[in-house]
Amino acid sequence: MRAVVQRVKKCTVRINERICGRIDRGLLVYLGVGEGDTEQDLDYIADKVVNLRIFPDKQDKMNLSVKDIHAEILIVSQFTLFGDSRKGRRPSYTDAASPPKAAEYYNRLIDRIKRQNLNVETGEFAARMDVTYTNSGPVTILLDSERRF
């Protein structure tokens, strides 16, 4: 499982000009699910997202998590995180999970994070979305459950 986590001042997701998700200060999380992903991968990403210390404390040191500051999270599915562009010019997505599996894991991640008493907004699985945001910092962190050890 892969995630791109961005610290944002604000973020909006639209589908055909309809706003389907919006947050203020918090995290924008793009989530890609791999074909071989398991429960352990889901646990790893969920734990990292809610506990990643990338918000500034009083000394302006990145030392606080989204949980610590009660910020919001917007989660958007993005199978292209599993794009392999090493050969040719068009990426291959053979390592991405099938849509049914990806949707299941996407929804399970949302549920897990909501159980942490955080406000979670979402995109819409498999929809064409327009995402607008202001990256704060900028801070962008890459998470890959295959590289957790």
Image (cartoon, rainbow, N blue to C red):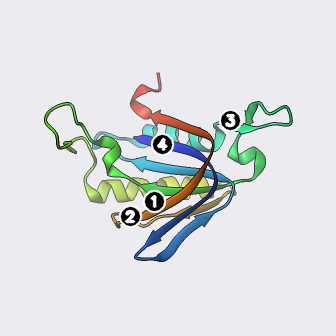
Q: Amino acid at mark 3?
A: Arg
**Element under disc 2:** loop
The Cα–Cα distance between marks 2 and 1, rounded to whole angstroms, is: 9 Å
| Quarter placement of the N terminus | top left
Instruction: Please tell me which of labels 4 and 1 falls first in the chain.
Output: 4
Q: Which mark is residue 53?
A: 3
Q: Which residue is mark 2?
A: 125
Image position of 84 (left or right of 126):
left
Q: Which residue is mark 4?
A: 4
Near mark 3 (Cα within 10 A), the count class, few <14, some 14-19 or many ≥20, is some
Q: Are marks 2 and 1 in contact (CB under 8 Å)?
A: yes
State the residue at coordinates (27%, 42%): 83
Q: Which mark is residue 107?
A: 1
Q: Position of residue 141 (x, y in %)?
A: 53, 36
**Element under disc 3:** loop
Q: Position of residue 135 (x, y in %)?
A: 59, 48
**Element under disc 4:** strand
Q: Amino acid at mark 4?
A: Val
Viewer-proximal residue, 42 or 33?
Answer: 33
The Cα–Cα distance between marks 2 and 4, rounded to whole angstroms, is: 16 Å
Viewer-proximal residue, 102 or 94?
Answer: 94
Image position of 14 (left or right of 119):
left
Q: Are marks 2 and 3 in contact (CB under 8 Å)?
A: no
Instruction: Please tell me which of labels 2 and 1 falls first in the chain.
Output: 1
In this view, 62 is above or below 66 = above
Q: Position of residue 47 (x, y in %)?
A: 58, 40
In this view, 106 is above or below 16 = above
The Cα–Cα distance between marks 4 and 1, rounded to whole angstroms, is: 17 Å
Label 1 vs label 3, nearer the camera: 3
The Cα–Cα distance between marks 3 and 4, rounded to whole angstroms, is: 15 Å
Q: Amino acid at mark 2?
A: Phe
Near mark 1 (Cα within 10 A), the count class, few <14, some 14-19 or many ≥20, is some
